[in-house]
Image: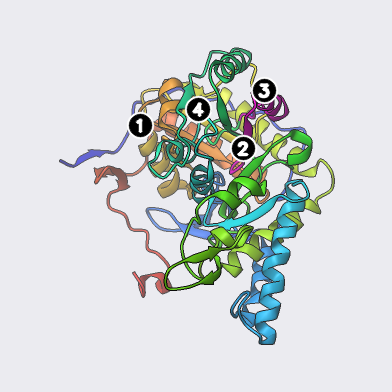
Amino acid sequence: MTSIISAVPACPQAPQAPQAPEVPQALLAVEGAGLTVPVVGGGVVEYANLDYAASAPCLSDVAEHVARVLPYSASVHRGAGFASQVCTSLYEGARRDVARFVGARDGDLVVFTRNTTDAVNLLARALPATAGGVVLVDLEHHANLLPWRGGGRRGTGDVRCVATQPTLEATLDALAAELRAAPVALLAVTGASNVTGETPPLARLARMAHDAGARFFVDAAQLAPHRPVDMAALGIDYLAFSGHKLYAPFGAGVLVGPADWLDSAAPYLAGGGAVREVSTTGVDWATGPARHEAGTPNLAGATAIAAACRVLTALPPGAWERHETVLRDRLLRGLGALDDVVIHRIWPDGGEPVGVVTFSLRRHDPALVSAFLSAEHGIGVRAGRFCAHPLLARLGAPGGALRASVGVGTTVAHIDRLLDALATYLRVGPGWGYAHRDGQWQPTPDDRRPPAWVEQYA
């Protein structure tokens, strides 16, 4: 059944957001900056991308680097031609750039994967069969929940999920107790919540894991695109992140960590490149990254990640954090000035957050609000449960919420447009009709049209 809504109950006009002490422009150039998109009723506006946490735009420097590489595109590792030698050098050099970016130790492997989810699945299959259990917290993204439960996991120990407590300190106490309760192979945590942006104390968690005889894995999908990471200094054993969140959307991710578990595990994929020798009756598998990178590697993806790592590393000290802090603070102040807005946090004593903010509008469907923002204001945010269903339920938003996330291409103008649009929605409701079809709200009629070149291939 199709339901139609053209307005919501009116609310008083919200106060204007306070002015931030600084007004940062974009920190780095990204592809798509200045992009215009259509809005319902005719006309176009500049797109305000506030959905960096899902997939970040490509850094312009990364796009230029990939364009320089493409003319040399050829077989990696397996060609005698000059172009192949160039590609092999770029691919292996990418490992070194990634290792430097995350502060890896000498001897740590850098394995290229498809994304963070792929990397966690690889590590789960490499977990030694007799090493013990895995300890998690129920606030994790599904990518760091489901692989440990799956049938492909090699370890025979149990998976123990600690319930988030009302404070960070209480949650850490619960984790410490769980780590002492039974043998543990691995403590696996998020480096920054993809829902609230909160960051746990990684060095402290690493010490807790090591004191229990366990290794420490960090899902850095949201941390690496927002803050410098130093695996050696923090005591992180394994770390994973995605290129598409690190301004390098070319279909690659990474897993970084010690070689022993990875070298002793069965190859993640069976095929060419993962072997030393093959006969009709047996196979001698390679060790090192090659063991888990069978098939033709994703050169563009790997070299794009490396380029993004180089660009971000070259930022002046503190510039990255200052840029995001100003934007996040401005967004939080503006949301706090609006009636009927609930800002979600996991803990009142949580760590310094990255540029991810999740909020709800009381009595309003987040999916409808996000459709309104897109159709009438050209603003992109995320609505839903963000692949973190247990956490959304714990935050009191089992049906979903709204998430705005910022990055190096975000400006104050983007934040202010979102706040103005939300104030309009709360004051007078949508200015267009919306229909609920196939589980989504859609403007009705939707007179926006994709670019002509898109329609040719749709």
Q: Secondary structure at mark 4?
A: loop
Is 208 drawn above or below residue 243 in the view shown?
A: above
Answer yes or no: do the residues labelled 2 and 3 have beta carbons within 8 Å?
no
| Residue on which disc 1 sits | 365
Pair 4/1: label in front: 4
Depth check, front residue: 146 or 413: 146
Q: Secondary structure at mark 2?
A: strand
Q: Earlier along the polypeptide chain: callout 3 or callout 4?
A: 4
Give the image location of residue 239, x and y in percent: 63, 43
Residue density around tag 3, few if under 14, some if 14–19, many if 20 or more, within 10 Å = many
Q: CA distance from mark 3 to mark 1?
A: 41 Å
Q: Residue at x 27, y 52 (%)?
A: 445
Q: Secondary structure at mark 1?
A: loop
Q: CA distance from mark 2 to mark 3?
A: 14 Å
Answer yes or no: do the residues labelled 4 and 2 have beta carbons within 8 Å?
no
| Residue on which disc 2 sits | 218
Amino acid on which disc 4 is placed: Leu
Amino acid on which disc 1 is placed: Asp
Amino acid on which disc 3 is placed: Met
Where does the magenta region start and end?
198-222
Residue reaching furthest to the front: 281
Depth check, front residue: 187 or 435: 187
Q: CA distance from mark 4 to mark 1?
A: 23 Å
Q: CA distance from mark 2 to mark 1?
A: 33 Å
| Residue on which disc 3 sits | 208
Amino acid on which disc 2 is placed: Val
Residue density around tag 4, few if under 14, some if 14–19, many if 20 or more, within 10 Å = many
Q: Which image quarter holds the N terminus?
A: top left
Pair 2/1: label in front: 2
